[in-house]
Image: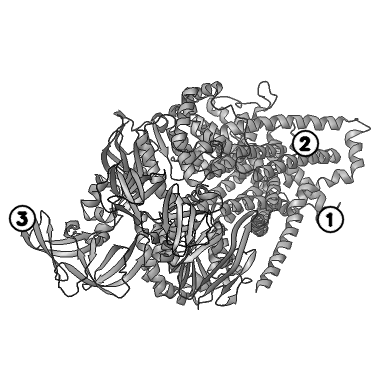
Amino acid sequence: MWNSWRILRIIVLASTFLAFTMLVLLPTVFLASFPIIYINDIVYEVFENPLIGNENLKLIAEVLIFSFKLSALTVFVDIILGIPLAFMLARANFPGKLFLETLVTLPLVIPTSGFGFASLLTWTTASGIGKWFGLSRGVLSIASSLPFIDVPIIVFIVHVTLTLPYVVRTVQAKLGEIDVVYEDASRTLGATSLTTFRKILIPELFPAIFSGSVLAFARSLGETGATLIVAGVRLTAAVAVVKWEFEFKLGTAAFLGLILVAITWLIILPVELFLMGAKGGVIKPPSIVSGSAIESLLIRLEVKLSKRSLKNTFYGLCTVILLVLTVTPIIVVIESVFNHMFKDPYTGKTEGSIIYQLFGPANYFPVILKSTAVSFVSAFSSTYISVFLSIPLVYIIDKYKFGKVLRAILKIPLVIPSSALGLSMLLLWGPKFLGFLTPGIWLIILTQIVFSVPVIVETTMAVYEGSNIKLYEDAAKTLGANPYHVIEKISLPILKEGIITGAILSFTHSLGETGAAMIVMGADTPISVLVVNMVESLAIPAALFTSAYLILISMVMMIVFRIVSRRRRI
Amino acid sequence: MGSLRLSNISKKFGRLLALKNVNLEISDGEYVVVLGPTGAGKTTLLRIIAGLLKQDAGEIYIDGVRVDDYPPEERNVSLFFQNFALFPHMTILENVAFGLKVRGYDSREAEKRALEVLRLMHLDNRAYSYPRELSGGMQQRVALARTIVTGASILLLDEPLSQLDAKIKAELQYELRDFVKSLGLTTLHVTNDVEEALALADRIAIINRGEVVQIGTPFEIVEEPKNVFVAGFMSDMNLMEGIVEEVSVDGTIIDIGGIRLKSSARGPFKRGEMVIIGIKPKDFKIQESDGELIGKIEDSIFSFKHRKLIVCLNNGLKVQVKTDKSGFEKGAHVSLVVDPNAIHLFSCPKGGLRAAIAEIMGVS
Amino acid sequence: MPEVKLINVNKKFGEIHALRGITLTVKDGEYVCILGPSGCGKSTLLRIIAGLLQPDSGRVYIDGKDVTYEPPEERRVGFVFQNIALFPHMDSCGNIMYGPIVKCMDRSTSDKVVKELMNILNIAKYGGLYPYELSGGVAQMVAIARALAAGAKLLLLDEPLGALDPRIRVNLRYELRRIVKGLNLTAIHVTHNQEEALTVADRIVVMRSGIVEDFDTPENLYWRPKNLFIADFIGKVNIIKGVVRKVMGEKILITLASGKSIELHAKGFSEGDSVVLAVRPENFEFSMDSNIEQSDSLTGTVIRARFMGEYYRYDIKTETDETIVVNYPIDKNVKKIGEKVRIRLNPESVLVYPYPEKGIERELMVEI
C-alpha cells in the first residue's frame, strides 16, 4: 500500500511539472528565444537599420523612459493611498467595509480595455462628468500632463487605479498576520498611532510594502489594455510592443518585449525570494537613531498629526479618491449607455444610437454575440484547466524546499506585460517553433492559463497558510485516514474556498484581458479586444455598449465572489 | 492488546538533539505520563510514535510488532492534539465518526457508535453543532471522544488539559483517568504540569532535554528522586552544595558551609567529593533549642494550608521550612533538626548547582 | 500611587453582555487580583481600565481624573500582556526604553531609572538579547520593566503568568508581589488561577459572567465565602446536603442525609430549612475507632486514592451515595481503594448556606 501511493505521487508530480513548464514557465521566458534566434534580424532592424540607423533603438529608449517615469510615479501614489486603505481593511470595523473590500479587488478583474474606455469617457469627454459641472468638454484633456513630470494625467490615474490593489492587498494580508497585541503594547506605553506605525509596524510591514510596490510597478509597466485607449499618442513600452507588432516592426517589438520581460523577472524574482527567505525582520529600513533629538522632534510632530479627527479625515480622503477613480467611470458608462440607447443625445438622430449600431447596417450585434461566446468559452476552459494544475502546485510549494522558488516564479505571470506574453505565446506555439497552433481560440485559452494559474495558486495558498491545514491532515492520518481520504475529506474541503475564489478571480480576469489576446486571437475576437476595435473604428455607441456589458459581467462575478468568500468569514 | 515499547529512540533537528536514547516500556492498560519542561521533546516523541515523524535511530514496537515502517493510519494508535484539531468543516458527530468511517465502517454504524461515545461525554445534544460553536472544555471532550472511538488500543495525549481553566482542569483530570481506565486503554500522556502527572499516572517518566531522566510511580519520583533535576522539578526540595566528610556503613556525613549533617543515604560518593543534599521543607522540624541548624527567619510565605518560612541559616544558606505551627515572627531565631532519612544525596550535576536550578526553573 | 475607580461600567459585544454595572474602587498601593473563569469579562474590564477598549456606559477614574474616553497613550499605566508581546525587532534594552523615548523623556534620568529597574528585576544581564533568545520567565520580567520604565505607577497585568510553564508560574508569583510592593505600585492582575490570586493579592475581585460576585481579602474569601459559588470557586469544597432540625440561639443542629447530625455556629436559619454544608478537603479527619457510633462522622468506601506529592487525595463514596474528597497529609496509614473508612468533619471549618433555589449544579456553573 505504501508503494502504490508513492508511485501515484510521482506520476502526479511529474505531470504537474511538465504541465507547469509547458503552460506557465516557458511562455514567460520564451520571448527571449526570438531575439537570440533572430539576432541578426534584430541587429539589422534595431541597431543598424539601413534606412533609419538606430532610430528604432532611440524609440525604444524613449518609450522605456516614459514608462519608467509613469510607473514610478504610480507606485509612489499607490503607497500613499494604499497603506491607509490596507489599515482600514485590516484593523477597523465600519459599515460598508465589505463594499470597500470589493472596491479594492475590482480593478484586478475589471476588463482593462473597457475600463480604459470608461475612464476616457468620464474624464476627457463632454459625456463624462464634465456634464455635471456644466462643462462642454471633459474635466481633463487627453493630453493634459502633470506639472514638472511630463506624464499625462489620464494615463496616470488609470494606472493608479489598476495597480492600487497590489499594494493594498499585500499590505493588508501582512497586517492581518501581525498580532494586534504589539500595537496595543505600544499604545499603552504612550505612543500615538503614527509613532506606533513608524517604530513597530514599518519594520514588520516593510517587506510587504516593498513586495506590493514591486508588483504594482511591474503591473504598471506591463499594463496594455487600458493604456491603449487612454494614452493617445504617447506610447508606453507595453503599448509600443503591440503597436509595432501590428506595424510589422516585429524585431523592434520583440526586442522591447524581451526587455520588458527581463525587467519583470529581474525585479520580481530576487525581491520575492529575498523577502521569503528573510523572515524575522532581517530587513530593516534605515532607522532614525532611537532616542535622539531628531526622533523627539519627529515624535512631537506625530502626536500632533495623530489626532483622531485628522486620522479619520485622511482615511476618508483615501476612500473618496478610490471611489472616484474606480466607481465614477463605471457609473458614467452605464449612464451613457442609457442615454445613447435609442438616439444620439447630441444630434437626436437614431443613426448614432446603440440600437442602430447593433442592429442596423453595421450589425454589430452578431459580432458581439460571437465575441461573447469566444470570451466565455476560453475563460471557462482556461479556468477549469488552471484549477487542476494549481492544486498539485500548492502541495508542491508547501512540501518541497524549492517550493519557495516556484512561488516566486509564479508571481511573474501576474504582472508580466500582457502584450509581451502574447508575443511569446505566438512564438512558442506558432509555426516558427512548436508549430501546433495558429492564432485562435486555443491559443487564447493557453495564454489565459499562464496568468490564471498564479491567481488560483495565490488565493489557495492564502487559505492554506491561514487555516492550519497541516494540523487537520495530521489528525486525520492518526485517525486512520489514508492519503486519498485525507485529500478528499480534509484538504480539499478546507481549500475549497481558496480554489473557488481564485477561479472566480481568474475567470473574470480572463474575460477582460486585452493585451495578450490582441496578439494571439487570430480571427476569434474576444469581447475585450472588440472594444478596442470599436474605439479605433470610431463606432462609439457600440464601444459604449460593449464596455458597459463587459464591466457589468465582471461586477456580477465580483458579487458572486463576495458571497462565496463571506460564508466562511465567521 | 495495547503494549508499547520504545527502544533507543533518537531524533535530531539540524544541530538540535531533540530526543536522545529514549527507552520506555508501557504495558497493556497502563497510564504513563511523560513529564518535563517545555521543549524537552515530549511532542516530538508522540509524533514519532504516531508515525507523523520518522526517528533517526531506534525502534518502536506496538504489541510486540515493529511498526517503524508503517504509516500513521496503520499503527493502531490514536493521537490527541494539544489544540484539539477538530475539523472545522464537519459537525461534531462527523468529527467523532471520522475515524470509523475511514477504517471502512458503514456510515450509519459509525455514527451510531459516535453518538454513544458523545453520550458518555454528555455532549450528544450538540452532535450537529460545529466546533467553533463550542467552549474550550466541550471541544476538549469532543476531541477526546474522537480519539477514543476509533478502537485503537493505545492513546497518545499531547497536553490534553493545557487549554483548560485551572478549576475545570482540576476536576477533569480525574475524570479523564477514570474514563480511559474504564475502557481498558493504554495511555501515554505528555505534560509539563506536575500536579496533572501526579493525579493521572500509574508511572511517570521525567524527560529533560530529550533524555528520560527517571521512570517510576508518583510516589517513587517524589519521595525517591534519583537526581537533582527530578528532585527540584517535582517538589520544593531545598538543594544545597556540600562536601563529603565521612562515608560509613550507616550513612554519609556531609559538611555544608560549616554545618555537619548526617544522612542515612549512601551513594557512590567518596571523601572530599562535592555532592548536593536535598531536604524537603516539611522535613525540617522546629525545636525549642539545640538543633543542628540554627538560623533566623527572613520571611514567611502565607498559604492557606500551612506556613512556609524562609530561614537564613548561620552559614549563610537559605532554606524553606514548612510548618503547621504559628507564631513565628520575622527576625526570630529558630532551631531546626532533620531526620537523617530525610536527607537526600545527589551527585553534583555538570555545570554546578546554580546551572541545574536555572534549568529546572527554565531560565537558561 | 493612583487610585482606580469604576462606576457602573457596562460593555456589550454584539449580543454578549460582557460587563454589567461594574462598580469598584482599587485603593492606592493595593495589589488587586480579578479572578474568574474564562469569559467572565475580566480581561475586558482590564482593557477598559487601560483604555484599549471603551465602555458602553459608566465611568473610569484613575487618580481622581475621568479617563473613560482617553486613549491609552494618554493614561499613565503600564500593561503586561499574557503572551508577553515584546517587540521582536528590538533587544531587551530597546524594548524597555521604548516608553521613555516615545514620551520624549529626559534621557539621562530615564537611563538611571531603567538601570535601577533592571537590577530590581534581575534582568540586567539580558539587556542586549532579543526576545526570541529569552526564556519565558525572563521575557515576562523584561515586559514588566518595559511597562514601568516611563514611570507608570499603575500596573495592569492580563494573565501575566498564563503562557509560562507551571513551575515558573509558582516562583514568579512571589516575584510579582515583591516588585509591586517594593516599588509602591498599584497593581490590578487578572487571572483564572485561584491559587495565584490567593497568594499574590491584597484583595480579590471574584467575577462571573460579567458581574462582581465579591471583592474581599483572600482570607475572608477563603475562610468566610459569601456564597456557595465563591466557596467552591476559590478552593474546592465538598457539598453535603442537610436539613435544619433545631435552632438553639447562635447554634443550629443539622441532620444530614445519612441520619447523622452536626452542630454548627450559624445565624439566619429556621427549623426545617434545607441547607448545604461546604467543607474543604483539608478539613476532615479519619476516625480510628470504628466501634463507637460517632454522630458527626460519615462512613464510606475509598473509591480513589492518589498520591499528590504533598498530600494524598482520597475520593470517598458515603453510604448516602455522596462523594467526598479528602486531602490528607502523607503519613503511615495510607488508605487503599475499597477500604471502609470513617471521616469526621471539624465543625469549626464547616460553612453552611441555604439550599440554592436553582439547584446545586446551576449555582456552581461558571457561565450564567
Check disc 3: other Cα within 10 Å, few if <14, some if 14-19, many if 20+: few
Q: Residues within 10 Å of mark 1 (few under 14, many from 20)?
A: few
Residue found at the far left of this picture? C249
- Residue located at (46% from left, 42% from top): C140
Q: Chain of mark 2?
A: A
Left or right of residue C263, residue A309 in this image: right
In this image, A152 relative to B314: left or right?
right
Nearest the viewer among C38 and A520 is C38
Same subunit: marks 2 and 3: no
Residue A232 in which image quadrant? top right
* Secondary structure beneath label 3: loop
Give whichever of A248, B273 is nearer the camera.
B273
Residue depicted at x 41% and y 64%:
B141
User: How far is disc 3 from disc 1 in space, using C-alphas?
Assistant: 108 Å
Asked whether the beta carbons under mark 2 and mark 3 sit within 8 Å of each other, the answer is no
Q: CA distance from mark 2 to mark 3?
A: 105 Å
Relative vertical location of residue C44 with respect to residue A348 in this rendering, above or below: below
Q: Which residue is mark 3?
A: C249
Observer-nearest of B77 and B219 = B219
Name the kind of residue labelled 2 in the image: Ala
Residue that mark 1 sits on: A434
* Amino acid type of the residue tagged 1 in the rendering: Leu
Where residue A201 sits, quadrant-wise, is top right
Q: Which mark lies nearer to you, 2 or 1?
A: 1
Residue B223 screen position, x and y as percent: 41, 62
Residue C129 in sight from this viewpoint: yes
Q: Position of residue A379 (x, y in %)?
A: 66, 53
Q: Earlier in the sequence, mark 2 or mark 1?
A: 2
Q: Which mark is residue A240?
A: 2
State the image coordinates of residue A354 (x, y, percent, origin top left): 62, 41
